[in-house]
């Protein structure tokens, strides 16, 4: 084995790890307001619709308010405490 092989670990068998990706529902975490009138721009209370920046779904103001109010509950990850499972 040459010098570069020793440095970069060449010549050995390579192991390929494949991660399973599950389909996740968009959490609609970033909602962008949209207005009908230029004069109303910048005033969130006058936004006529809201668009999710990730999936481009459009929401009415009531739906957007509900999503914004429940954001924390929807995006909290289920992470085990440091003493249980997982790598150390």
Image (cartoon, rainbow, N blue to C red):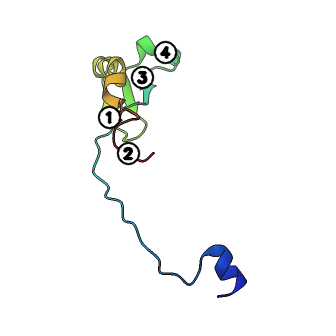
Q: Report the number of discs.
A: 4
| Label 2 close to label 1 by CB (< 8 Å) | no
In this view, the mark in front (3 or 1): 1
Disc 2 and disc 1: Cα gap in Å? 13 Å
Q: Which residue is mark 2?
A: 86
- Lower position in the chain sequence, tag 3 or tag 2: 3
What's the distance in space between the residues labelled 4 and 2, CA to CA? 50 Å
Which residue occupies the foreground of this view, 73 or 64? 73
Residue 71, percent across and down? 35, 24
Secondary structure category for the residue under label 2: loop
| Label 4 CA crowd tier, 10 Å (few <14, some 14–19, many 20+) | some
Looking at the image, residue 17 lies above or below residue 74: below
- Disc 3 is placed on an element classified as loop
Residue 23 — which label? none
Residue 85 appears at what percent x and percent y? Answer: 34, 43
Frontmost of labels 4 and 1 is 1
The local secondary structure at tag 4 comes to helix
Q: CA distance from mark 4 to mark 1?
A: 40 Å
- From the viewer's perspective, tell me whether residue 50 is left or right of residue 6: left
* Mark 4 or mark 2: whose residue is earlier in sequence: 4
Q: Are marks 4 and 2 in contact (CB under 8 Å)?
A: no
User: Do callouts 3 and 2 mark residues in contact (Cβ within 8 Å)?
Assistant: no
Position of residue 73 measured from the top left corner of the image (x, y, whole percent): 31, 24
Measuring 28% from the left and 22% from the top, which residue is drawn there?
63
Q: Nearer the viewer, residue 3 or 49?
A: 3
Residue located 39% across and 32% down the image: 51
Between the C-alphas of marks 3 and 4, the distance is 8 Å
Q: Residue beneath label 1, please?
A: 78
Quarter that holds the C terminus: top left
> Which corner quadrant of the image does residue 36 belong to?
top left
């Amino acid at each position: 084995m040459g010098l570069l092989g020793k440095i970069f670990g060449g010549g050995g068998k390579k192991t390929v790890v494949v991660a399973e990706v599950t389909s996740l529902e968009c959490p609609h975490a970033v909602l962008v307001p949209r207005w009908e009138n230029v004069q109303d721009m910048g005033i969130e209370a006058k936004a006529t619709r809201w668009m999710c920046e990730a999936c481009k779904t459009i929401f009415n103001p009531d739906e957007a308010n509900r999503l914004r109010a429940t954001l924390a509950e929807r995006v909290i990850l289920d992470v085990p405490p440091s003493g249980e499972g997982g790598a150390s």
